[in-house]
Amino acid sequence: MLLDKFEPMSRVQAELAALGIKPFGAVTEQLLSATEGVVEGRRVILAGTNNYLGLSFDPRCIAAAQAAAARWGTGTTGSRMANGTFAEHLALEAELADLYRVPHAMVFTTGYAATQGMCATLAGPGDVILLDADSHASIYGGAQLSGAEVIRFKHSDPADLEKRLRRLGERVANTLIVVEGIYSMLGDTAPMREIAAIKQEYGGLLLVDEAHSLGVLGDQGEGAAVAAGVGAAVDFFVGTFSKSLGATGGFCATPHAELEAIRFSTRAYIFTASASPSVVASTRAALAIMRAEPELRTRLWDNARQLYDGLKALGFRVGPNPSPVIAVTLTDRDQAFAWWRRLLEAGVYVNMVVPPASPSGDSLLRCSISAAHSRAQIEQMLAAFAALRTDAAG
Amino acid sequence: MPDYNSYVQFICNLLQTQQKSASRPLSESTDLIADVGLSSLQVMELIEKLEDHFDLSIPLNILPNITTIGDLATQLHSLKH
């Protein structure tokens, strides 16, 4: 039967309902600030929202969105290819091109559409996409749609990437290498210098998805590649507005003039309505703040270190280095569900991640830190995690 | 260059060393998931080992065509030749 394949998912949902928890699709009933809200009836600290710079409640971004809605209306009602290209979209594209010091940029309606659309369009039948094994679902989805041969290399393993490029021989000229700046689940940063050096030696084109590194790394928040000093080796900077910039949407910035042809060859760009003017306006305001206020990044990293060091001291299994994404790894899925509920009861909302969304067979209690978190809030997060340990010991 | 049977034998040996107690003898018709009980993650780990050993890359596109040890051996043989 057509719908039988959904039975395992329905079973998991029933299991969770029986436990009285809703880790997937938990309802936020009220937002009190960038870091506090009411989730599933409880007032909680938001420690799983990817709101790295805390700009979703910045008064300048809100004012820009309000002014744009008043001026342009609530939506564009059309594709960028038809009636949906407004001056605001072009201004944002020029600002993104300026951020990366490249001549071309295009804006997508969502971050998913940006990565999926670029991967699906840049490569085609006869080409090769060489992607990091831990790539986001949008990258895998785009690669599959492209019709290209898709090869994965071991996560953040430059030697494995090199080996696979060598095996491709002359086909390297038709190869798109895809990596992420910071990986969304474990928060680790890609070894950009090594990857860029290998790309320069072997050839191919390099696409870097800076979704979780935009605003987080680099003097102006450009992301992992520019922060590592290898921006010149990148052919396509891709990213999203839905994390550090507190909105929705995505982009691609590139030195390649072909972007203007790619723009109207990309289904995810053409066959959807363009971003609403209010969203574009708040994104532009957030982008300007991201570039002009490096102190936000300083605060973000201070906060990240406080949580990372605290969790490590409590004996939790976290990643190798501090990062604004800090995932506590658990081998037992049921324990992860129970602990997620305990954290919510203690006033802390984190993301629950289970296979296959997690990169291994483990489950994750994934925290994301914001520049807007206070030290007291992080202490409360740590106290909630410490209580899990105490309960387990008891 | 190894022939098809060499690939089958190599995969069987690799799986046997991983399995503490093989419930039944492995052959080209053995289903990697239904018979051996590999998870999708373990299938990817097996493929990485084969890629390293035979110095080739197995495209993800062909994975839907691989169910049995024989299917995997066929793909390895085809990619290597």
Image (tube, coloured by chain):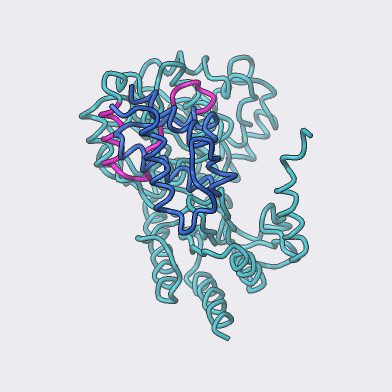
Residue B58 percent across, percent down from the top left = 40, 31
As drawn, is A205 to the left or to the right of B42? left
Residue A348 percent across, percent down from the top left = 60, 68
Residue A198 located within the stretch drawn in magenta: no
Quarter the N terminus of chain A occupies:
top right
- In this picture, is B80 found above or below A67? above
**Closer to us: B18 or A196:** B18
- In this picture, is A87 found above or below A43? above
Chain letter for the cyan colouring in the rendering: A
**Closer to us: A72 or B33:** B33
Chain letter for the blue colouring in the rendering: B
* Residue A18 placement: quadrant: bottom right
- In this picture, is A299 found above or below A257? below
Residue A354 percent across, percent down from the top left = 58, 55
**Magenta residue span:** A143-167
Residue B80 percent across, percent down from the top left = 33, 25
